Amino acid sequence: MDEREKSLIERCRSGDAGAFEELISPYMQKAYETAYRMSGNHADAEDVAQEALIKAYRSLVSFDGRSAFSTWLYRIISNTAIDIARSRNRRPTSPLDSIGDRSDPYPGGNPADCAEAALLQEDIQKALLQLPPEQRAVLVMRDIHDYSYQEISQTLRISVGTVKSRVHRGRAALQQIIRRNFPGLCSVEYTEGTEG
């Protein structure tokens, strides 16, 4: 942890709410993306992110600096998303709201290509949401955010062996879900990433 983060954490512990905003600012985009991938839609992702940030603010006094602040923060976000998914006892759906609210409706391509890419992302998200939350968490961290197995282990406080097992089982289950429910994705081969 760098001196800037240490200073901001101390200011937060002294009651400086502005310091907390400054502390979490560099991590917000990735935090929201993690919450979105875990929850499946923007409204739920906002709920997860907001609840996780409240937990992080309240728990900052217990942060001991043995792990990176980002690792600690993403652990809270992942656990909050898993808890919310369990408590709702449902499989949320993913609306097409991920392609809305853009100033450029066709970034980097023509409308047909953008629509096809959006539908592909939607189907992948729907397939991902059919996994148990624990498998979903490790796949989001490993295959979307490119965390190493060690980083996932530290973030979720599970062994590296458990991480590898969940990744392996999650990938196999996701492949079956895609084959069974999303035949249009069958040309997309879901393969294992590199060892991390």
Image (spheres, rainbow, N blue to C red):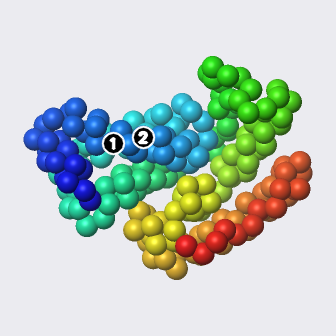
Instruction: Specify the amino acid type for callout 2.
Output: Met
Q: Nearer the viewer, residue 18 or 40?
A: 18
Residue sitting at 13 percent across and 37 percent down?
A: 15
Residue sitting at 52 percent across and 75 percent down?
A: 162
Q: Residue furthest bottom?
A: 161
Q: Nearer the viewer, residue 129 or 118?
A: 118
Quadrant where the image shows the N terminus: bottom left
Residue sitting at 87 percent across and 56 percent down?
A: 186
Q: Position of residue 69 (x, y in %)?
A: 31, 55
Residue wearing tag 2? 28
Q: Position of residue 173 (x, y in %)?
A: 72, 64
Q: Residue furthest left?
A: 14
Residue sitting at 33 percent across and 42 percent down?
A: 24
Residue 139 in the figure: left or right of residue 32 = right
Q: Is residue 9 among the parts visible in the rendering?
A: no
Find residue 109 and report its image quarter: top right
Residue 68 in the figure: left or right of residue 106 = left
Label 2: element kind: helix
Instruction: Specify the amino acid type for callout 1.
Output: Ile
Find residue 55 and report its image quarter: top left
Residue 29 in the figure: left or right of residue 103 = left
Q: Position of residue 177 (x, y in %)?
A: 78, 57
Label 1: element kind: helix
Residue 166 in the image: above or below residue 75? below
Residue 53 in the image: above or below residue 2? above
Contact (Cβ within 8 Å) of mark 1 with mark 2: yes
Q: Is residue 185 among the parts visible in the rendering?
A: yes
Residue wearing tag 1? 24
Q: Position of residue 120 (x, y in %)?
A: 79, 43
Binning the other alpha carbons within 10 Å of mark 2 as few (below 14), some (14 to 19) or many (20 upward) gives some
